[in-house]
Amino acid sequence: MQYFKVLQHQGRLMWTPAVFPGACPYPTMHLAAVWLLRYSVVMCLLLHSLVLMAFCFHHAATSCSKRCYCSETESGGKTMRCSNLQLTEIPEDIPNDTQRVYLDFNLLSAVPTNAFAGLTHLVELDLSHNEISQLEPGAFRGLGSALQFLDLSSNKLVNFNPDAFEDLRARANLTNNPWLCDCNLQMALPRVDLEPASLTGIVCQTSDPEEIGVQGLAFLLEPDIDLCVVMKRTTDVAMLVVMFGWFTMVISYLVYYVRANQEDARRHLEYLKSLPSRQGKSEESSTISTVV
């Protein structure tokens, strides 16, 4: 509130601002109020922005993936259920603190490289009952020793790719897949670190060669079967063919060399026969000496 006092100057009344002892003059108080109001609004907006950014980062790190249902576990981790949602791709917004992910009964056809990178707390991963036929190299990279159970049952896996299970030591369910048991599979199994009991789930639906007789058998339980024997035989046959080819070339060269030398020798012999003999020349000289 502004106070005024009345002054008389040259017979006229004038209104002037009243200044009380200890009070600030009006212009100074006005500027201070404007300054405080301006900078308080700026600071308030800045603080509000920082709070919103922190909330967004926290929400991005801990929120649940779209269409999925998430729940907290007793240990503080998160369980994400995306079962039976007709998903064709693995969600990319899985929270980093997730411990269990259920993607079963969907339409997934492949697991790309680094599909679960950053999920260092994941202990269980369920990919069963999908259409998965391809596991790209490094599909489970980043999970390491944290993952305890991996379910790939009831999919369409045919070929076993050891590079997909890089540094993975979990228990795995590999049953109900149309596995092809061949030499590549036999050479790949020693390269993975999955629990040995997990590999018993590889039951041969087809084999190469077909007559090896492993259809319907758990491949790991048949240690006497050698699916690489055909490849070894093929390699041996190829080596024999190559050796026979080289041997034939060597023999052909020797025959050609001998025949060429024989022809040269015959020509040289005929040339020598065509020359006068030394014996005739010596008899002729002796006769001339006798006559003389």
Image (tube, rainbow, N blue to C red):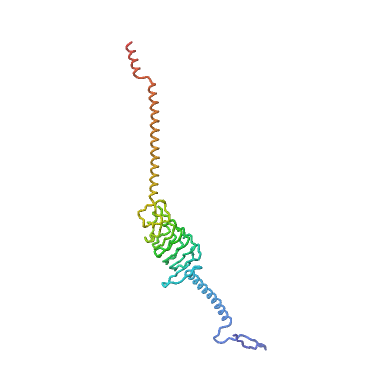
The residue lying toward the viewer, choosing from 25 and 64, is 64
* Quadrant hosting residue 78: bottom left
The residue lying toward the viewer, choosing from 271 and 127, is 127
Drawn side of residue 109 relative to residue 18, left or right:
left
Residue 179 at what x, y percent from top left? 43, 56
Q: Residue at x 33, y 15 (%)?
A: 283
Quarter of the figure that contains the C terminus: top left
Residue 240 at what x, y percent from top left? 38, 43
Quarter of the figure that contains the N terminus: bottom right
The residue lying toward the viewer, choosing from 137 and 133, is 133
Q: Is residue 292 visible?
A: no
Q: Residue at x 38, y 22 (%)?
A: 273
Drawn side of residue 24 relative to residue 257, left or right:
right
Is 209 located above or below residue 44 in the figure?
Answer: above
Image mark count: 0
Residue 159 at what x, y percent from top left? 43, 56
The residue lying toward the viewer, choosing from 156 and 25, is 156
Q: Is residue 23 visible?
A: yes
Q: Residue at x 38, y 47 (%)?
A: 233
* Quadrant hosting residue 202: bottom left
Q: Residue at x 39, y 33 (%)?
A: 255
Residue 127 at what x, y percent from top left? 45, 63
Is 148 located above or below residue 185 in the figure?
Answer: below
Is 286 located above or below residue 112 in the figure?
Answer: above
